[in-house]
Image (spheres, rainbow, N blue to C red):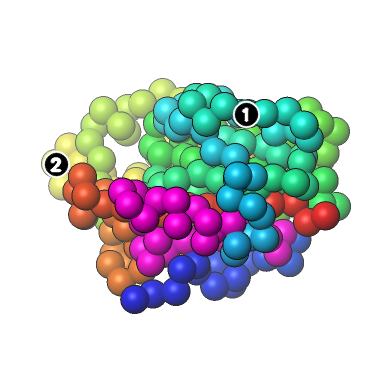
Amino acid sequence: MPNSIFPATTAGPLAAVAPLHAFTTRALSFRGGSTAADWAELARLINAPDVSIVRVSQVHGRRVVHVTPGVAVPPDLEADAIVCTDPGRGVAVRVADCVPILIADEAHRVVAAVHAGWRGTCASVATATVEAIAGLGISPAELVAAIGPSMGPCCYQVDERVRTAFLGMTPDAAAWFTEDGPGHWKLDLWRANADQLVMAGVPRTSIAVAGVCTGDDRARCWSHRRDGAGAGRMVAAIRLSK
């Protein structure tokens, strides 16, 4: 059985800026009878009471929610990114192949958790998150980000419909695809999200890509594509240091 979380090195420079963060492994499933215990364990890992981990109903879009001190966030609120300026609460997103992104700033004023599947990536949810943080007066140049375990370019095959959607967003998206047989391509969501963060102003050197493919790493990762409907969920969570 793997450890409950990936090592801090997975997050690269984010680990130094935001020590209270975690990318979970398949040792936790966040499904069925273990759900409450898994959230309690995650809360322990990021030093936050389980009632203080904010999560939302993820809909594969680009809506960003801002968590501020004293303001409640209903769990059924639809969004795919959570920006937090409340040190009393953590924020988290759930994935089972989609890309989890954790963001923090060097001055410990804000953190964010982002869920970026192909639809969210195509909608530039990472860009929307950086823009929301910039709206708080925090320069993107001061941000540090980590792209966590998710379906990698080695395994993520998509069809013409997905490629066309991306190319309609920007012709630069062609660089994120590699031909993989007639009418199919491998999509590099790691690079796509890293490029979007850079285009939004985050320094390339401040972005870590875990490089762990959920489809390939059966020992540590849940994968909806590989495991089917019975797959558990992995969680990316982060909390401001007080």
Which residue is depicted at the point 49% across and 48% down?
100
Residue 158: x percent and y percent?
25, 40
| 108 vs 169, nearest the viewer | 108
Looking at the image, is 190 positioned above or below residue 46?
above
Query: Residue 73: which numbered mark, if any?
Result: 1
Residue 202: x percent and y percent?
70, 46
Quarter holding residue 69: top right
Q: Is residue 102 left or right of residue 188?
A: right
Task: State which region is magenta.
Answer: 18-43
Q: In the rendered structure, which amino acid carries the disc numbered 1?
A: Val
> Element at badge 2?
loop
Q: Nearer the viewer, mark 2 or mark 1?
A: 1
- Per the model, the C-alpha gap separating discs 2 and 1 is 45 Å
Q: Is residue 9 magenta?
A: no
| 220 vs 50, nearest the viewer | 50
- Which of the image's four quarters has the C terminus? bottom right
Which residue is depicted at the point 67% across and 37% down?
83
> Element at badge 1?
loop
Asked if one can make out residue 25 in the rendered structure from this viewpoint, the answer is: yes
- Which of the image's four quarters has the N terminus? bottom left
Q: Is residue 31 magenta?
A: yes
Residue 207: x percent and y percent?
63, 56
Looking at the image, is 15 positioned above or below residue 180?
below
Query: Residue 182: which numbered mark, if any?
Result: 2
Residue 194: x percent and y percent?
56, 48
Quarter holding residue 134: top right
Q: Is residue 36 left or right of residue 216?
A: right
Which residue is depicted at the point 46% across and 36% down?
121
Asked if one can make out residue 149 in the rendered structure from this viewpoint, the answer is: no
Which residue is depicted at the point 54% across and 38% down?
55
Q: In the rendered structure, which amino acid carries the disc numbered 2?
A: Pro
Q: Is residue 60 left or right of residue 197?
A: left
